[in-house]
Image: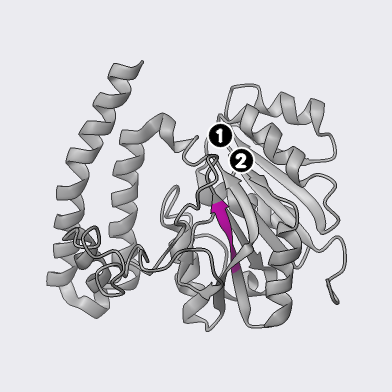
Amino acid sequence: MGSIETGYIDVAIVAWRTRALLRACLQSVLGQPEVDRIVVVDNASGDGTVEMVQGEFPEVHLIANQCNLGYAAANNQAIRAGRAPFILLLNPDTVVQDGAFEALLQAFEENLRVGAVGAQLVLPDGSIQRSCRSFPEPRALLTDALGLWRLFPQSAFWGRYRMTYWDHDSPQEVDQPMASALAIRRSALEEVGLFDEGFPLYFNDVDLCYRLKQAEWRIVFQPKAKVTHHHGQSTGQIRAAALIESHRSLIHFYAKHYRGKIGWLGYWSVVLAAWITMYPRAALASASRRYST
């Protein structure tokens, strides 16, 4: 692994009602030679997660919140509790495969301006999860809303936002990998700041990646770092509310980063489009959960 030494990366996990999956996640990272400290922040799960970590993984640094502070604030707690020069943000519904830590650290070593490295997410059936998108700039959102990426998935124009033209199986510089398994250079975080807690659940990772890019840090995708992802096990428990929060966060992202660039007309067009597309999906999610319980 070249000049990379052991004890080089912290693992930060925010948990909410995913006890069994968290157990498997912790088993996959414990004992890895590249790992320095593992920090679990439990957001008041109330499902025995805290007791499980205390009883089965005493070497894990546990922060047990008395209320749900949200994903952004809890991740900030975990990052502050670490000490290694790199941090792997990891969802509790993941399992890190052998060699992933080495591949992530190697990507940082190859270029000192790499601020973040996204791992390749693999679904339980072995298929690759498309986990990278471009920033939701106006043109990308418009082409996505029109749905023509479904007809022309290989088009870099129509598939820009979801990056459907790319197989997610080759190294590439990207805008925003999912934070389900995202490694970050601590010095880059010290420059741009931690997660913006104004994005409690969604778009906090998009906002962080945007700030990294604005500060001229590179973000790369490393397919050699493979992580199995069960996908949406926490937010799936509150699907309708999560959809509403996702769209609220998109609007907040535009207010923070784009309103001055696209003007009030462009901004309110995004707001209107977001809520028009959100309500049917939220109603469907709410009905689906109601009839499945």
x and y percentages locating residue 227 in the rendered image: 62, 51
Q: Quadrant of residue 106?
A: bottom right
Disc number placed over residue 138 in the picture, else none: none
x and y percentages locating residue 234 in the rendered image: 49, 35
Vertical position of residue 235 compared to residue 104: above or below? above
Vertical position of residue 275 compared to residue 170: above or below? above
Q: Nearer the viewer, residue 200 or 246?
A: 246
Disc 1 is placed on an element classified as loop
The quadrant the C terminus occupies is top left
Q: Confirm whether the magenta stretch covers residue 245.
A: no
Residue 173 seen in this snapshot: yes
Residue at the disc numbered 1: 16
- In-image side of 110 versus 153 (left or right): right
x and y percentages locating residue 213 in the rendered image: 49, 78
| Magenta residues, dominant SS class | strand
Label 2 or label 1, whichever comes before in sequence order: 1
- In-image side of 270 versus 67 (left or right): left
Q: Nearer the viewer, residue 30 or 42?
A: 30
Name the residue located 65 percent from the left edge and 41 percent from the top edge.
41
Tell which tag, 2 or 1, sits nearer the viewer: 2
Residue at the disc numbered 2: 92
- In-image side of 257 versus 131 (left or right): left
The residues colored magenta run 117-121
| Mark 2: amino acid | Pro
Are the residues at dot 2 and dot 1 in contact (C-beta closer than 8 Å)? Answer: yes
Q: What is the spatial separation of the Cα atoms under label 2 and label 1, in whole angstroms?
A: 8 Å
